[in-house]
Amino acid sequence: MNPIKRALISVSDKQDLIPFAGRLAEWGIEILSTGGTARLLTENGIAVTEVSDYTGFPEMMDGRVKTLHPRVHGGILGRRGVDDAVMAANHIAPIDLVVVNLYPFERTVAQPGCTLAEAIENIDIGGPTMVRAAAKNHAAVTIVVDSADYARVLREMEAHQGAVDDALRFSLAVKAFEHTARYDGAIANYLGAIGEDGERMAFPHTWNSQFIKALDLRYGENPHQGAAFYREPGATAASVGTARQLQGKALSFNNIADADTALECVKNFPGQPACVIVKHANPCGVALGKDLEEAYQRAYRTDPTSAFGGIIAFNGSLDAATARAILDQQFVEVIIAPEVLAEAGEVLAAKPNVRVLACGEWPDDAPPARDCKRVGGGLLVQDLDQGMVTPQELRVVTQRAPDARELEDLMFAWKVAKYVKSNAIVYCREGMTIGVGAGQMSRVYSARIAAIKAADAGLEVKGSVMASDAFFPFRDGLDSAAGVGVTAVIQPGGSMRDEEVIAAADEHGIAMVFTGMRHFRH
């Protein structure tokens, strides 16, 4: 390891730069820099040599060309002990440390009204070239693309008389290539979504995304499958990906998938304590209550058998009484809530294997997002299903309109049905699921299963409402619902036999509303 003698610093994000560069200067390291970075360093009393003075060529073309020069790239790429003679012959001094981050392309194009010309001018050329060069020559050069690594590099230099060890240089080189890959991917996504007519397309020619490994998992859905969990870079909204694990065993593949379903479902019930219990990707109990404990007890009553070993999500701060009720009543794999109060944490500590996650609060409106599904030889990409109707958007199609209580329950049931695997049928009454029929090839069988589950739990379907994630292709679904005492139905409509289904509802005195929106979930 050789000590760092010369550094090139050119950054767009100048966070924490001055303390870092100041320490380099204290060690007597020569600092080369450009434009705004050089000015900032000079203003703070840090000696710096402008790259244009170092190369003998001025910045030109409004800054488009400033570091693209052999004295810069030769100094970065030169192999120590191999290229020394040619470097000396061409007056190229080695550059041992490169500190570069790139023009904020993603932030620029995310701004409303950003033009193509503005986007193009924020495509960095010199920066990625230096980053890739330094990363390639990491055997001799340290590359830093993230201000979070400044302290780490300084500690290494202090420990090794101004040098950085091989392991850290390699780690930083990997991070640098990840950085430029994401940068180029963002550019390709943006430009690739502009059609030949100049209009933006919903989906680009190529799909480029990057995720950061958060966990190596013991296995995937099954023990013979390897697995890992990757987080979305920059994600801050409350989610499984950003949640903090407060206690418990390591999360499994299925834990994470089911916790996601439970959390995303419970987010749909603002303003009143709510609980969602998920088992094998489906809500098996969802309820509202005057407090979280009541919401949990009502959700548990829907299907105590399926709740065993389930995932439980709440939309409020988990308290001690609710935590105690869970542990006294069932085996639970994961509990996730915006916050876990200290008193609840003390109760849960009695079961140290229970995985407890705190995800933080979430806004009422989530930003648009994409949903992906791997298939053989390809990837399906779609808008995330964030659709929801309001009571005012419902269309009453039967002779009888739902009364106020039924309407409230219909909206509750519709929100639950969105998270149940198709074909989905959900029976609800008074802010509580009564029976859930999930994942059947026939919608009428989903309805029968929902009724069977309600009976097994000792719950009466009579007086409940029913939600169906898609239209009824035949009247048999309505006949089945009427047979167990359903009084109102919510469904998308759109079947060729809608009139037949509406007539069946009228025959049975059932109020039915159409949403005009389907919620298939596969």
Image (spheres, helix red, strand yellow):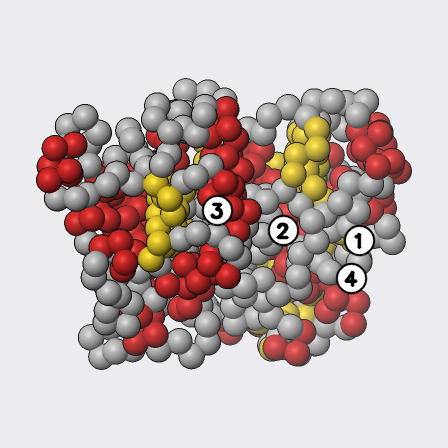
Pointer 1 local density, CA inside 10 Å: few below 14, some 14–19, many at least 20 = many
User: Foreground: 353 or 62?
Assistant: 62
Where residue 489 appears, as percent x and y from the top left, is: 64, 64
Amino acid under disc 3:
Ala
**Residue at image location 30% in from the left, 56% down from the top:** 51
Q: Is residue 198 above or below residue 212?
A: below
SS at circle 1? loop
Give the alpha-carbon distance from disc 1 to disc 3, as whole Å.
51 Å
Give the alpha-carbon distance from disc 4 to disc 2, as whole Å.
17 Å
SS at circle 2? loop
Give the alpha-carbon distance from disc 4 to disc 3, as whole Å.
50 Å
**Residue at image location 22% in from the left, 79% down from the top:** 197
Where residue 130 appears, as percent x and y from the top left, is: 28, 48
Q: Which mark is residue 238?
A: 2
User: Foreground: 422 or 149?
Assistant: 149
Pointer 2 local density, CA inside 10 Å: few below 14, some 14–19, many at least 20 = many
- Can you say which quadrant of the picture contains the N terminus? top left
Q: Which residue is mark 3?
A: 21
Q: Which residue is mark 4?
A: 271
Q: Is residue 196 left or right of residue 436?
A: left
Q: Marks 4 and 2: CB-CB under 8 Å?
A: no
